[in-house]
Image: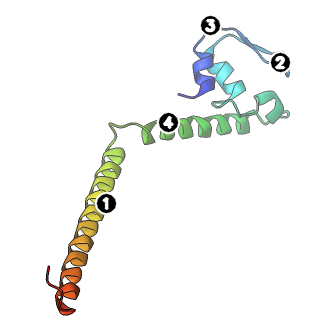
Amino acid sequence: MSELNETLQGRGPWTCFHCGDTFKTQGTARDHFGFDPSSDPGCLVKTGADRGLLMALRKSEAANEELLRLLHDENSEGYRVAARQASRHQSQLMEAEESGYERGLRDGLKLSTFKGNSV
């Protein structure tokens, strides 16, 4: 949950210091202030009949907030797939490193025996 949503969890009303409007419900406050602290308040975005555009922006911000929440949800299928892939990748790296180390030991033994030095 974003900082602004946590702030809006408190009791209202909320007053905008840009325009002085007071919002009594969380929904109207969120529509005006946005879903993120970096959002511009509606009074700075809308001019005249642009309320529809402002509402489309707020819906887009809400969808983005939900997608970010789902992305970071450890119970989601996407997170589990990414974790499995990371685990598989880590295992493959370890196998490759061990294989290279064993090959180096074999090559070192061959080189040592080739020069007439016995181990």
The x, y position of residue 41, in whole percent, is 76, 29
Amino acid on which disc 1 is placed: His
At 85% from the left and 34% from the top, the residue drawn is 47
Q: Which residue is labeled 2 in the image?
A: 17
How many other residues sit within 10 Å of disc 4, few (<14), some (14-19) or many (≥20)? few
Q: Is residue 86 left or right of residue 21?
A: left
Which label's residue is closer to the chain start, 4 or 2?
Answer: 2
Q: Which mark is residue 66?
A: 4
Label 3 is placed on what type of residue?
A: Arg
Circle 3 residue: 11
Nearest the camera: 57 or 114?
Answer: 114
Per the model, the C-alpha gap separating discs 1 and 2 is 52 Å
Assign a secondary structure to mark 2: loop
- Element type where label 1 sits in the image: helix
Nearer mark to the viewer, of 3 and 1: 1
Q: Residue at x 31, y 60 (%)?
A: 89
